[in-house]
Structure formats: C-alpha cells, structure tokens
Amino acid sequence: MKLASFMADGRDTYGLLKGDVLYEPGAGFRTRFPDLRAAIGAGVLHELKTDDSAVAHAVSSVQFLPPVPAPDKILCVGVNYRPHIEEMGREVPEKPVVFVRFPGSQVGHDQAILRPQVSEQLDFEGELAVVIGKRARHVTRATAYDYVAGYCCFMDGSVRDWQNHTVQFTPGKNFDSSGSMGPWLVSRDEVHDPAALILTTRVNGKLMQEGRLADLLFDIPALLEYCSTFCELLPGDVIATGTPGGVGAARSPAVWLCDGDLVEVAIPGVGLLRNPVSDE
C-alpha cells in the first residue's frame, strides 16, 4: 500500500494511493481515525482497501503533506554511511549518532524548502525514513521489523554553519521548512529487503548522492534496538537512517542550495520526493 497525507478542498486528510488517485476514507472512518498517525496506531490501514465510502481525489488536485504530519518524535541518525563519515572528517562512531528534528521543520512532496535568511549554507541530505507501526520498547534485532509500518523518502536539509556552532546538531537541523518527507508511506510488505534499496539525490537534475542501504553502518534493526532502549517509540514516529556521501558541504567548492533549485530524493520501490527551494 501507498498511503499519503494531503490537503484537499481546504482541509488536511489522508488516503490510499492507487495510480493517480488518492482515496480518502469516508467520514465515519475519519471520525474514528482523524489522521494517518491514528490509523497506523489502531492497526486499521488494511481497512482502507475495502472502504466503499472512500472519496476519490486526483493527485494533481491535492497538496501533499509529510506522510505523518505530526509524529510524536523524529529521530535522525548522523554519519551512518562510511563515505559520508570520511568526507565530513569524522571518526567511525561506536554507537548511533542520534539527533532530533521537529515536525515544523518538515514539508511535504512538491512543497518549497526554505533557505533561512540568516544563512547561505543550506545543504541536502537524502535518506530513507522508517515509520513506526506500534509501540516499541526494548526491541530486539530479531523482532525489529515487526514494529515497522513502512518507509518513505526523507530530505534532511541542514543549515551547516548553524549545525557547526557547537557539537550539538539541533540548531542546524530544525529551521522552519528546511527539510522534507514523502511523497507517501510505502507499507512494509511492499519492501521485502530494505538493504537492497538504492538511494539517490539530485539537485537540478545532477546526481549528487548515491548509496546502498546495505552500506549503513547501523542498519534498521540496530537503530530500532538502540532507539527503543532510550525511549518508547510510538506509532507514526520517524527514524531517518542517515545520508550517503556527496553532500554539498564536502565538495570543493561547496554546493549550497539556492532559491530556484530543485532537490529530488529517489528510492526505487519507495518513491521520489521532489522539492523546490525558496528563500525565506
């Protein structure tokens, strides 16, 4: 299944994607489960396939939102591919490097990413994001995928000068509308082997990043095991797994996103997340 959150007819809603049509669940279903996060938590996503009262919306008529518009938490993993570790001049970490993004720092597919007025160093980081399907605490590697609802593309827009003010990443990772997620959530059953996925990031059509999920330093089970140990993961929570090499900050000269640029994060089998860049 492909599931999306979107704005249609002036209101936020969600639905099941089939071809070029989004099927919004009927009023009764939405009363019980007002957003995709609630539907994930209740374990009722399969019911969207048989909802006879669903309302059809052409994809061209809606505005995409992040698949989970208001997750309880967005946990991001830094320096999780060796090429990115090397290009950033960091040591190989012994444990996952985890930082937090706020929901307001994310926009949906085809929505503008904003370069903040206080910096010219907005960088791109294409990633695979994992969406949690049920409450998870002290998860083991063997059972980790049982807690996954699905996957989507993620663009961890990074304001590098603010990121490097201190050893803490938080300021540079949380400017309003500096990153994106989408275009939709692909259910876990459609991705048989996440390690086989290949991720690319393009800026204005030029290939900037390419990485195999098999090359993650800490793979998805390791991340769920680690993160669920220090906090309880809730339905709809997001774990962004890290970015491969090729980021703008590591290039000579550096490549920063500018007004009018177009960023595309593609993961065949998951989706293609596309965002224009605008000045704040």
Image (spheres, rainbow, N blue to C red):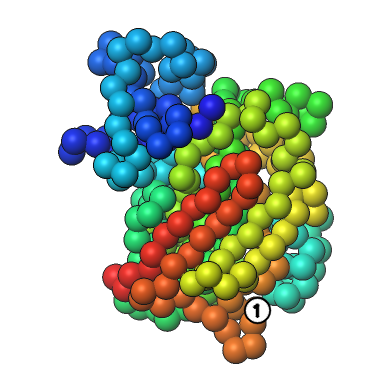
x and y, in percent, of residue 205 in the image = 53, 70
The residue depicted at 35 percent of the width and 44 percent of the height is 64
Q: Is mark 1 on a helix, strand or loop?
A: helix
In the image, taking residue 99 as reference, residue 122 lies left or right, namely: left
Q: Which quadrant of the figure contains the N terminus? A: top right
Regarding residue 216, the answer to whether it shows in the image is: no
Looking at the rendered structure, the kind of residue marked 1 is Ala
x and y, in percent, of residue 130 in the image = 60, 39
The residue depicted at 48 percent of the width and 23 percent of the height is 40
- Disc 1 designates what residue? 250
x and y, in percent, of residue 199 in the image = 66, 55
What count of labels does the image hold? 1
- In the rendered image, the residue lying farthest to the front is 19
Q: Please, is residue 217 above or below residue 129 in the view?
A: below
Regarding residue 150, the answer to whether it shows in the image is: yes
In the image, taking residue 98 as reference, residue 42 lies left or right, namely: left
* Residue nearest the viewer, comparing 83 with 207: 207
In the image, taking residue 87 as reference, residue 274 lies left or right, namely: left
The residue depicted at 47 percent of the width and 39 percent of the height is 184
Q: Please, is residue 232 above or below residue 128 in the view?
A: above
Mark 1 Cα shell of 10 Å, populated few (<14), some (14-19), many (≥20)? some
Residue 68's image quarter?
top left
* Residue nearest the viewer, comparing 81 with 50: 50
* Residue nearest the viewer, comparing 230 with 110: 110
- In the rendered image, the residue lying farthest to the left is 10
In the image, taking residue 15 as reference, residue 8 lies left or right, namely: left
x and y, in percent, of residue 166 in the image = 56, 72
The residue depicted at 39 percent of the width and 49 percent of the height is 108
Q: Which quadrant of the figure contains the C terminus? A: bottom left
Residue 140's image quarter?
top right
Q: Please, is residue 107 above or below residue 258 in the view?
A: above
